[in-house]
Amino acid sequence: MRVVVAEDTAILRAGLVQLLEEEGHEVLAAVADAEQLRVAVLDHRPDLVVSDIRMPPTHTDEGLRAAIELRAANPGLGVLIFSQYVEAQYVSRLLAGGSAGVGYLLKERVLDAQDFIDAMERVAAGGTALDPEVVNQLMGASPTRRTVAELSPREREVLGLMAEGRSNAAIATGLVVTERAVEKHVANIFLKLDLPVSAADHRRVLAVLRYLGA
Protein backbone atom coordinates (compact mmCIF):
# COMPACT_ATOMS: atom_id res chain seq x y z
CA MET A 1 0.00 0.00 0.00
CA ARG A 2 0.95 3.63 -0.52
CA VAL A 3 -0.03 5.39 2.70
CA VAL A 4 -0.21 8.89 4.18
CA VAL A 5 -0.23 9.05 7.99
CA ALA A 6 -1.73 12.01 9.88
CA GLU A 7 -1.04 11.95 13.63
CA ASP A 8 -0.02 14.89 15.80
CA THR A 9 1.68 12.80 18.51
CA ALA A 10 5.26 12.48 17.29
CA ILE A 11 6.05 9.15 18.97
CA LEU A 12 2.89 7.46 17.72
CA ARG A 13 3.41 8.91 14.25
CA ALA A 14 6.95 7.51 14.13
CA GLY A 15 5.71 4.15 15.41
CA LEU A 16 3.07 3.90 12.68
CA VAL A 17 5.62 4.74 10.02
CA GLN A 18 8.04 2.10 11.31
CA LEU A 19 5.31 -0.55 11.52
CA LEU A 20 4.09 0.09 8.00
CA GLU A 21 7.55 0.12 6.47
CA GLU A 22 8.50 -3.09 8.28
CA GLU A 23 5.42 -4.70 6.68
CA GLY A 24 6.58 -3.63 3.24
CA HIS A 25 4.22 -0.70 2.73
CA GLU A 26 5.31 2.70 1.42
CA VAL A 27 4.71 5.71 3.67
CA LEU A 28 4.51 8.65 1.29
CA ALA A 29 4.18 11.27 4.04
CA ALA A 30 3.70 11.45 7.81
CA VAL A 31 2.14 14.73 8.89
CA ALA A 32 0.99 16.39 12.09
CA ASP A 33 -2.07 18.42 11.08
CA ALA A 34 -5.05 18.38 8.75
CA GLU A 35 -3.76 20.98 6.31
CA GLN A 36 -0.56 19.02 5.77
CA LEU A 37 -2.74 15.94 5.25
CA ARG A 38 -4.67 17.65 2.45
CA VAL A 39 -1.44 18.74 0.76
CA ALA A 40 0.15 15.29 1.11
CA VAL A 41 -2.84 13.53 -0.48
CA LEU A 42 -2.93 16.03 -3.33
CA ASP A 43 0.81 15.62 -3.95
CA HIS A 44 1.13 11.84 -3.55
CA ARG A 45 -2.27 10.28 -4.40
CA PRO A 46 -2.04 7.46 -1.82
CA ASP A 47 -4.14 4.31 -1.61
CA LEU A 48 -4.93 4.91 2.04
CA VAL A 49 -5.00 7.65 4.66
CA VAL A 50 -4.56 6.82 8.33
CA SER A 51 -5.69 9.80 10.39
CA ASP A 52 -6.46 10.81 13.93
CA ILE A 53 -9.61 12.87 14.53
CA ARG A 54 -8.37 15.65 16.79
CA MET A 55 -5.36 17.56 15.52
CA PRO A 56 -3.99 21.13 15.58
CA PRO A 57 -4.92 23.89 15.72
CA THR A 58 -8.18 23.40 17.67
CA HIS A 59 -7.91 19.68 18.49
CA THR A 60 -11.59 19.08 17.73
CA ASP A 61 -12.39 17.29 14.47
CA GLU A 62 -9.85 18.61 11.96
CA GLY A 63 -8.59 15.18 10.95
CA LEU A 64 -12.06 13.80 10.37
CA ARG A 65 -13.20 16.78 8.34
CA ALA A 66 -10.11 16.56 6.17
CA ALA A 67 -10.64 12.82 5.66
CA ILE A 68 -14.28 13.32 4.62
CA GLU A 69 -13.30 16.08 2.17
CA LEU A 70 -10.51 13.96 0.70
CA ARG A 71 -12.80 10.94 0.24
CA ALA A 72 -15.34 13.11 -1.56
CA ALA A 73 -12.64 14.44 -3.89
CA ASN A 74 -10.94 11.04 -4.33
CA PRO A 75 -13.64 8.29 -4.38
CA GLY A 76 -11.11 5.44 -4.46
CA LEU A 77 -9.20 6.69 -1.43
CA GLY A 78 -9.36 4.42 1.63
CA VAL A 79 -9.67 6.19 4.97
CA LEU A 80 -8.87 4.62 8.32
CA ILE A 81 -9.61 6.78 11.34
CA PHE A 82 -7.35 5.81 14.24
CA SER A 83 -8.39 7.66 17.37
CA GLN A 84 -8.91 7.41 21.09
CA TYR A 85 -12.31 9.02 20.74
CA VAL A 86 -15.58 7.44 19.68
CA GLU A 87 -18.67 9.58 19.16
CA ALA A 88 -21.78 8.82 17.16
CA GLN A 89 -21.55 12.00 15.10
CA TYR A 90 -18.08 11.03 13.89
CA VAL A 91 -19.21 7.60 12.72
CA SER A 92 -22.30 8.98 10.99
CA ARG A 93 -20.34 11.64 9.14
CA LEU A 94 -17.65 9.21 8.08
CA LEU A 95 -20.09 6.60 6.74
CA ALA A 96 -22.55 9.01 5.18
CA GLY A 97 -20.74 8.64 1.85
CA GLY A 98 -20.77 4.84 2.01
CA SER A 99 -18.92 2.23 4.04
CA ALA A 100 -16.65 0.89 1.28
CA GLY A 101 -13.03 1.78 1.98
CA VAL A 102 -13.74 3.11 5.47
CA GLY A 103 -12.33 2.12 8.85
CA TYR A 104 -12.58 3.44 12.40
CA LEU A 105 -10.39 1.86 15.07
CA LEU A 106 -9.81 2.85 18.68
CA LYS A 107 -6.19 3.22 19.71
CA GLU A 108 -6.54 1.61 23.12
CA ARG A 109 -8.32 -1.45 21.68
CA VAL A 110 -5.75 -2.35 19.03
CA LEU A 111 -3.63 -4.87 20.92
CA ASP A 112 -2.04 -6.69 18.01
CA ALA A 113 -0.01 -5.00 15.26
CA GLN A 114 -1.04 -7.59 12.69
CA ASP A 115 -4.72 -6.93 13.35
CA PHE A 116 -4.07 -3.26 12.61
CA ILE A 117 -2.22 -4.07 9.39
CA ASP A 118 -5.00 -6.45 8.34
CA ALA A 119 -7.60 -3.71 8.93
CA MET A 120 -5.58 -1.24 6.88
CA GLU A 121 -5.22 -3.66 3.99
CA ARG A 122 -8.94 -4.45 4.11
CA VAL A 123 -9.88 -0.76 3.96
CA ALA A 124 -7.37 -0.04 1.17
CA ALA A 125 -8.96 -2.87 -0.83
CA GLY A 126 -12.41 -1.29 -0.51
CA GLY A 127 -13.58 -3.15 2.59
CA THR A 128 -14.69 -1.91 5.99
CA ALA A 129 -13.04 -2.11 9.41
CA LEU A 130 -15.10 -0.86 12.35
CA ASP A 131 -14.25 -1.51 15.98
CA PRO A 132 -17.27 -3.20 17.63
CA GLU A 133 -17.26 -0.49 20.30
CA VAL A 134 -17.72 2.12 17.58
CA VAL A 135 -20.80 0.29 16.28
CA ASN A 136 -22.14 -0.18 19.80
CA GLN A 137 -21.74 3.49 20.65
CA LEU A 138 -23.84 4.48 17.67
CA MET A 139 -26.38 1.68 17.63
CA GLY A 140 -26.55 0.62 21.24
CA ALA A 141 -26.00 -2.97 22.29
CA SER A 142 -29.53 -3.73 23.44
CA PRO A 143 -30.51 -7.37 22.77
CA THR A 144 -34.12 -6.21 22.27
CA ARG A 145 -33.24 -4.31 19.09
CA ARG A 146 -34.59 -5.77 15.88
CA THR A 147 -31.93 -7.41 13.76
CA VAL A 148 -30.98 -7.78 10.13
CA ALA A 149 -32.10 -11.42 10.32
CA GLU A 150 -35.71 -10.18 10.31
CA LEU A 151 -35.29 -8.74 6.83
CA SER A 152 -36.34 -10.61 3.70
CA PRO A 153 -33.59 -11.86 1.33
CA ARG A 154 -34.32 -8.99 -1.08
CA GLU A 155 -34.24 -6.42 1.74
CA ARG A 156 -30.89 -7.78 2.93
CA GLU A 157 -29.62 -7.52 -0.63
CA VAL A 158 -30.74 -3.90 -0.83
CA LEU A 159 -29.18 -3.14 2.55
CA GLY A 160 -25.92 -4.75 1.44
CA LEU A 161 -25.83 -2.44 -1.58
CA MET A 162 -26.60 0.52 0.69
CA ALA A 163 -23.57 -0.50 2.74
CA GLU A 164 -21.47 -0.22 -0.42
CA GLY A 165 -22.56 3.41 -0.67
CA ARG A 166 -25.00 2.90 -3.57
CA SER A 167 -27.85 5.35 -4.14
CA ASN A 168 -31.41 4.13 -4.65
CA ALA A 169 -31.04 4.73 -8.38
CA ALA A 170 -27.83 2.67 -8.53
CA ILE A 171 -29.42 -0.12 -6.50
CA ALA A 172 -32.41 -0.18 -8.87
CA THR A 173 -30.10 -0.47 -11.88
CA GLY A 174 -28.06 -3.24 -10.26
CA LEU A 175 -31.10 -5.28 -9.28
CA VAL A 176 -32.99 -4.51 -12.51
CA VAL A 177 -36.02 -3.12 -10.67
CA THR A 178 -37.66 0.29 -10.53
CA GLU A 179 -36.38 2.98 -8.21
CA ARG A 180 -39.84 3.03 -6.63
CA ALA A 181 -39.45 -0.66 -5.73
CA VAL A 182 -36.12 0.12 -4.07
CA GLU A 183 -37.72 2.97 -2.12
CA LYS A 184 -40.33 0.51 -0.80
CA HIS A 185 -37.62 -1.94 0.24
CA VAL A 186 -35.69 0.84 2.02
CA ALA A 187 -38.84 1.94 3.83
CA ASN A 188 -39.47 -1.66 4.95
CA ILE A 189 -35.86 -1.91 6.15
CA PHE A 190 -36.27 1.19 8.29
CA LEU A 191 -39.55 -0.16 9.67
CA LYS A 192 -38.25 -3.63 10.48
CA LEU A 193 -35.05 -2.28 12.06
CA ASP A 194 -37.10 0.15 14.16
CA LEU A 195 -35.49 3.27 12.71
CA PRO A 196 -38.12 6.02 12.83
CA VAL A 197 -37.69 9.43 11.22
CA SER A 198 -35.53 11.60 13.45
CA ALA A 199 -33.93 15.02 13.07
CA ALA A 200 -31.01 13.81 15.16
CA ASP A 201 -30.15 10.61 13.27
CA HIS A 202 -29.29 9.58 9.71
CA ARG A 203 -31.45 6.46 9.20
CA ARG A 204 -29.52 5.21 6.17
CA VAL A 205 -26.25 5.27 8.12
CA LEU A 206 -27.87 3.59 11.14
CA ALA A 207 -29.26 0.82 8.94
CA VAL A 208 -25.84 0.23 7.37
CA LEU A 209 -24.23 0.06 10.80
CA ARG A 210 -26.82 -2.50 11.89
CA TYR A 211 -25.94 -4.52 8.78
CA LEU A 212 -22.18 -4.29 9.46
CA GLY A 213 -22.70 -5.20 13.10
CA ALA A 214 -24.55 -8.34 12.04
Image (cartoon, rainbow, N blue to C red):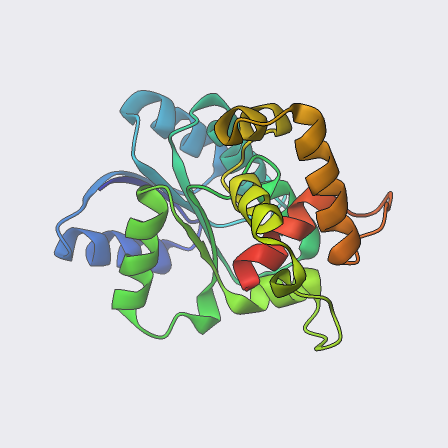
Q: Is residue 110 left or right of residue 194?
A: left
Task: Tell me which residue sits at (70%, 77%) in the image.
Answer: 143
- Residue 213 visible in the shown view: yes
Q: Position of residue 157 (x, y in %)?
A: 54, 46
| Quadrant where the image shows the C terminus | bottom right
Q: Position of residue 83 (x, y in %)?
A: 50, 58
Q: Nearer the viewer, residue 21 or 12?
A: 21
- Residue 55 visible in the shown view: no
Residue 182 quadrant: top right
Q: Is residue 129 left or right of residue 2?
A: right
Q: Nearer the viewer, residue 127 or 61?
A: 127
Q: Position of residue 154 (x, y in %)?
A: 58, 46
Task: Tell me which residue sits at (49%, 64%) in the image.
Answer: 131
Q: Position of residue 48 (x, y in %)?
A: 34, 39
Task: Tell me which residue sits at (63%, 29%) in the image.
Answer: 168
Q: Nearer the viewer, residue 115 or 49?
A: 115
| Quadrant where the image shows the N terminus | top left
